[in-house]
Image (cartoon, helix red, strand yellow):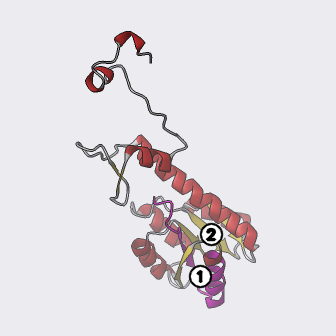
């Protein structure tokens, strides 16, 4: 995931005032808000906007939030997107049902803005770290000639910039013993040390 890209947060609520507040709060904290007023709209926006996280009310017209969450988790395209329920339904059974539907967190209304933003931040960063870890564990598309690496968005990066952009690793350059004779044929063999 591009580190410079503002994370997209899909907020789903059927109360326009709640959506307006969430949009303002999210934008103020550096996120790109995407809004939906019902369950079907939420599924459509999740498919097109490809959000980094979804804030989902349970009580929605048409499809309720629990069903929306189950459908998101059943779709390979949205399976990995974290869902935080943001709802007034806060009984133990409601919270348990939310986690069983696939949510990663549950915030009761009325919510405290700093607490909500802290939870959003944690889950967005956790998702980014998971994606980066998968990229680094998986197959890295590499140019056979220049050895550049292609990222998830299709951009090509030098090995050094890709690794330093996705990990905390740093590079220290030297010359291995196999390359010394090729590039420095007059170099005294006994002087080379690993």
Q: Can residue 152 be seen in this snapshot?
A: yes
Magenta-colored stretch includes residue 6: yes
Local crowd size for mark 1, using a 10 Å CA cut-off: few (<14), some (14–19), many (≥20): many
Q: Residue at x 47, y 52 (%)?
A: 131
Please provide the residue range marked out in magenta: 1-26
Q: Which quadrant is home to the C terminus?
A: top left
Relative image position of residue 172 (x, y in whole percent): 49, 34
Local crowd size for mark 2, using a 10 Å CA cut-off: few (<14), some (14–19), many (≥20): many
Furthest-front residue in this view: 186
Q: Can residue 97 be seen in this snapshot?
A: no
Q: Residue at x 55, y 60 (%)?
A: 102
Decide: is 107 above or below 79: below
Contact (Cβ within 8 Å) of mark 2 with mark 1: no
Relative image position of residue 40 (x, y in whole percent): 45, 80
Furthest-left residue in this view: 145
Q: Residue at x 34, y 45 (%)?
A: 140
Magenta-colored stretch includes residue 163: no
Q: Which residue is mark 1?
A: 13
Observer-nearest residue: 147 or 7? 147
Is tag 2's residue or tag 1's residue first in the polypeptide sequence?
Answer: 1
Furthest-bottom residue in this view: 16
Observer-nearest residue: 189 or 16? 189
Residue 85: give its label. 2
Decide: is 85 above or below 132: below
Relative image position of residue 175 (x, y in whole percent): 39, 27
Q: Which of the 4 image quadrants contains residue 176?
A: top left
Q: Which quadrant is home to the N terminus?
A: bottom left
Relative image position of residue 64 (x, y in whole percent): 55, 77
């Amino acid at each position: 995931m591009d580190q410079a890209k503002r994370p997209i947060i899909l907020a789903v609520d059927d109360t326009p005032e709640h959506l307006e507040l969430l949009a303002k709060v999210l934008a103020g904290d550096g996120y790109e808000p995407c809004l939906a007023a019902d369950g079907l709209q939420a599924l459509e926006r999740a498919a097109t906007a490809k959000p980094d996280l979804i804030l989902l009310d349970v009580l929605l017209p048409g499809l309720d939030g629990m069903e929306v969450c189950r459908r998101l988790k059943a779709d390979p395209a949205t399976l990995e997107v974290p869902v935080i329920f943001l709802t007034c339904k806060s009984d133990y059974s409601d919270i348990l049902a939310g986690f069983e539907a696939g949510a990663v967190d549950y915030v009761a209304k009325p919510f405290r803005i700093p607490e909500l933003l802290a939870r959003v931040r944690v889950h967005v960063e956790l998702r980014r770290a998971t994606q980066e870890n998968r990229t680094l564990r998986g197959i890295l598309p590499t140019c056979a000639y220049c050895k550049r690496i292609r990222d998830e968005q299709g951009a090509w990066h030098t090995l050094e910039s890709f690794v330093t952009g996705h990990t905390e690793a740093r590079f220290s350059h030297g010359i291995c013993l196999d390359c010394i004779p090729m590039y420095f044929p007059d170099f005294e063999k006994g002087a080379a040390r690993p």
